[in-house]
Amino acid sequence: MMRIQMAKYSTVHKVVYFVRHGESEANTAPVVQSPESPLSELGRHQAQLIAERATQLRFDALISSPFARARETAQEIAQDTEADVEYSDLFVERLKPSSINGKPFTDPAASAIWERWEESLFTPEIRVEDGENFDDLVARADRALSFLEGRPEHALLVVTHGYFLRTVIARMLMRDALTGSIHRAFQSSFVSQNTGMTVIRLENNALESAPRWRLFTFNDHSHLR
């Protein structure tokens, strides 16, 4: 029987190490988290551990969301690796309606807005106040991937947020097949640990004419102890 010999190599054009920020004070509080929620004591410890791990990585640029919890995590990494931090709004967490930031979940009005806004994250064309919706998140995930692909560096470390990171991965894997219902299932089925590391690579194998993003590692938090 004739056998077709397949090429077993691929060319890696770019590597991106995504890191979710350390635990914030609002992650464990019964309030709607605002952009300026700082790291908790545990979050600072987690940031120190991921910073220590980052010293074992080779990366050419350190990029971070400017939200306080991501900024503080990135600064720990910068201190240990002697890298400069570049901030980008592309990697902030999903933007909530600003009217409910910091409000307790027991506030009836804030809770009602939150519920309507959460539904908009899975329903195209629905918008609640100034919060992002499904269309916004998908478009921003596309811009983030294009931004990373266009960077001249081979390896980048990006400090971001759990929900938006999962949106990027869902869009990367599903492409135009990503619907609101698939997005809902993806968000509820995948868990991102604080300071968990996710690695994606832009690569192509011998049978492909153009490179594509591939998921290499998801939510590796073996550094936590």
Image (cartoon, rainbow, N blue to C red):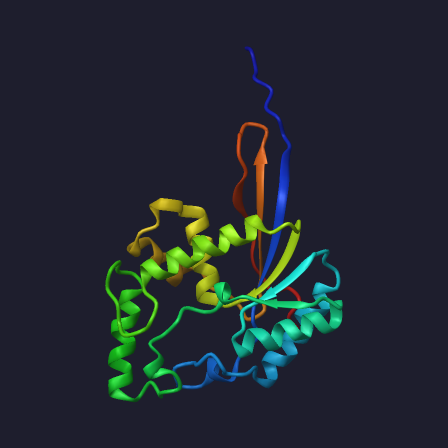
- Quarter of the image where one finds residue 132: bottom left
Q: Is residue 71 visible?
A: yes
- Judge left or right: residue 189 versus residue 56: left
Between residues 63 and 50, which one lies in front from this camera angle? 63
- Judge left or right: residue 123 versus residue 69: left
- Image coords of residue 168 (percent x, y): 46, 56
Residue visible at 49% across and 63% down in the picture: 90
Between residues 147 and 157, which one lies in front from this camera angle? 147
- Quarter of the image where one finds residue 180: bottom left
- Judge left or right: residue 98 versus residue 142: left
- Image coords of residue 51 (percent x, y): 69, 70
- Image coords of residue 66 (percent x, y): 54, 73
Residue visible at 32% across and 64% down in the picture: 133
Q: Look at the image and tell me in which quarter the N terminus lies.
A: top right
130 relative to 91, above or below: below
How many numbered circles does the render carry?
0
Q: Is residue 184 visible?
A: no
- Image coords of residue 76 (percent x, y): 68, 75
Between residues 210 and 53, which one lies in front from this camera angle? 210
Residue visible at 75% across and 71% down in the picture: 80
Q: Look at the image and tell me in which quarter the C terminus lies.
A: bottom right
Residue visible at 50% across and 64% down in the picture: 91
95 relative to 28, above or below: above
